[in-house]
Image (cartoon, helix red, strand yellow):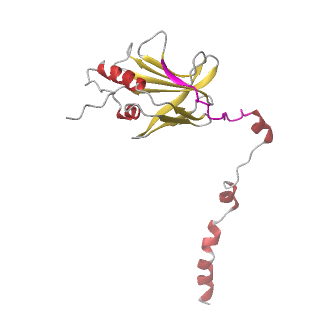
Amino acid sequence: MPIRPFALFAFLPLAACSAAASDNAVQKFSFDELQAQAAPVISASPDATDAVWMAAADDTHSLRFGRPNEAPMLTLTCETQSKATPIIHIVRNATGEPGAKALFPLLGSNMNARIAAETRMRDGKWIWESEVPALDPQLDVFLPGNAVEATLPGGGTLKLAASKEPARVIAACRHQTGAELVSAEPAPQA
């Protein structure tokens, strides 16, 4: 009976399958647990129709983008105190989930950038913030003075108006690092 040993080996792979391996394919949950979780934060893209870049009243190295006499939609600040290297601190006033982290895409006409962002508690709500070294080439997305689109998870897309003011703040911040001043104006052609 040489067929029996062969039949035994033919069914051996089937013995490796077990109910324990298939248990991992299904995730068990409770409806009570799902109701206890906070709903995801999703908001529509802000209307930036009349929004403009304005220097912050308290600082020449800080800009706010928004409508006059309203809370800013985005702030861009050069921070040099208590920092080894100056940084550009970007605050996107869009509510996020506690402790969330994401890449913050900045889409310009000449280049695109993706910078790290995370939510931090400010005035009782979680908002998105980024700290970028002033010399980071990704900040060049602001330098030509063109419009930039800034998008965040759950916060929609903010269309930043074209302006040379962000380039001025970034160039001044870079100048404080001892780096060559990056001009917001193009060099004249000879």
Report the side of 71 relative to 148 (left or right). right
Foreground residue among 23 and 27 = 27
Q: Residue furthest top?
A: 58
Q: Locate residue 79: give its quadrant.
A: top left
Q: Locate residue 153: give its quadrant.
A: top right
39 is higher (above) or lower (below) than 1: above
Q: Residue at x 62, y 36 (%)?
A: 154
Quick check: can you spot residue 153?
A: yes
Question: How many numbered markers are drawn?
Answer: 0
Q: Residue at x 64, y 69 (%)?
A: 15
Q: Quadrant of the C terminus?
A: top left
Foreground residue among 34 and 86 = 86
Foreground residue among 150 and 96 = 150
Q: Residue at x 37, y 16 (%)?
A: 80
Q: Locate residue 126: give its quadrant.
A: top right
146 is higher (above) or lower (below) than 30: above
Foreground residue among 62 and 28 = 62
Q: Is residue 45 magenta?
A: yes
Where residue 69 appears, x then y in whole percent?
60, 15
Report the side of 10 relative to 116 (left or right). right
Give the prevailing secondary structure in the magenta stretch: loop
Q: Residue furthest left?
A: 190
Q: Quadrant of the N terminus?
A: bottom right
Q: Residue at x 54, y 36 (%)?
A: 151
Where residue 28 appears, x then y in whole percent?
73, 48
Q: Which residues are magenta?
A: 37-54
Where residue 98 appears, x then y in whole percent?
62, 28
Q: Is residue 149 magenta?
A: no
Where residue 78 appears, x then y in whole percent?
41, 19
11 is higher (above) or lower (below) than 135: below
55 is higher (above) or lower (below) than 186: above
